[in-house]
């Protein structure tokens, strides 16, 4: 399924779709209360899908309590969608540092300035925190200890291709002990 995903992602990029690496991340609390938001896929290999965030954010707290998550890549302009269900786990600090080094300085400073998901008093408060971060780190911006990545290791990957008369193609890959089982689902 990873080779298929790479082909579809490449087609989304070649087709000029805006933010083809945008995915909906669905998490749930330990009590099962769901939440969803868009995040960006930053790395992909045969072990999973990686995104980065503030480790104190709502999504990170929910993953800590319940690591079972779902990802959805909605490529509507191509009549395609990929849904991934799996387990999220933090990437290593070395992986986090390697990705951090590729981020623009403004994004690095923004990570220091924003205590993501916490209530703030005003936009001015956020802008003041960004200015303070820029003053604190005039050159190299280190990785915050509260910032990192998660790798979603898929249990299932479903590829949906829209079809005429709502006769869509749905291919479901399910991880097995020996690899992947492929099944066709009714639309």
Image: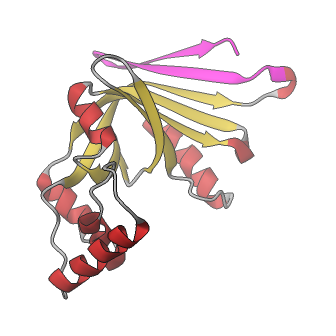
Horizontal arrangement in the rendering, residue 185 relative to residue 112 (left or right): right
Rendered position, 32 above or below 20: above
- Percent x, y for residue 83? 52, 30
The quadrant where residue 170 appears: top right
Q: Main secondary structure of the magenta part?
A: strand
User: Which quarter of the rendering shows the C terminus?
Assistant: top right
Span colored in magenta: 166-187
Q: Can residue 54 be seen in this snapshot?
A: yes
Rendered position, 56 above or below 82: below
For the point 36% across and 17% down, the residue is 32
- Percent x, y for residue 51? 34, 49
Q: Nearer the viewer, residue 129 or 34?
A: 129
Q: Residue furthest front?
A: 121
Horizontal arrangement in the rendering, residue 44 relative to residue 136 (left or right): right
- Percent x, y for residue 130? 30, 75
Horizontal arrangement in the rendering, residue 71 relative to residue 86 (left or right): right
Q: Nearer the viewer, residue 130 or 141?
A: 130
For the point 27% across and 40% down, the residue is 60
Horizontal arrangement in the rendering, residue 107 relative to residue 181 (left or right): left
């Amino acid at each position: 399924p990873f080779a298929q995903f790479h082909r579809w992602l490449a087609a989304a990029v070649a087709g000029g779709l805006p933010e083809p690496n945008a995915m909906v991340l669905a998490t749930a609390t330990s009590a099962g209360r769901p939440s969803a938001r868009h995040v960006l896929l930053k790395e992909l290999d045969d072990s999973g899908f990686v995104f980065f965030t503030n480790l104190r954010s709502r999504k990170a707290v929910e993953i800590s309590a319940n690591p079972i998550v779902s990802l959805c890549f909605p490529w509507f302009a191509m009549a395609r969608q990929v849904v991934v269900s799996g387990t999220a786990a933090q990437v290593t600090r070395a992986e986090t540092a390697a990705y951090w080094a590729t981020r623009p300085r403004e994004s690095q400073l923004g990570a220091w300035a924003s205590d993501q998901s916490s209530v703030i008093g005003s936009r001015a408060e956020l802008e003041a925190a960004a200015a303070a971060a820029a003053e604190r780190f005039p050159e190299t911006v280190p990785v915050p200890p509260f910032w990192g990545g998660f790798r979603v290791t898929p249990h299932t990957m479903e590829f949906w291709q829209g079809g005429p008369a709502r006769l869509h193609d749905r291919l479901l890959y399910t991880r097995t002990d020996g690899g992947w089982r492929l099944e066709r689902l009714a639309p």
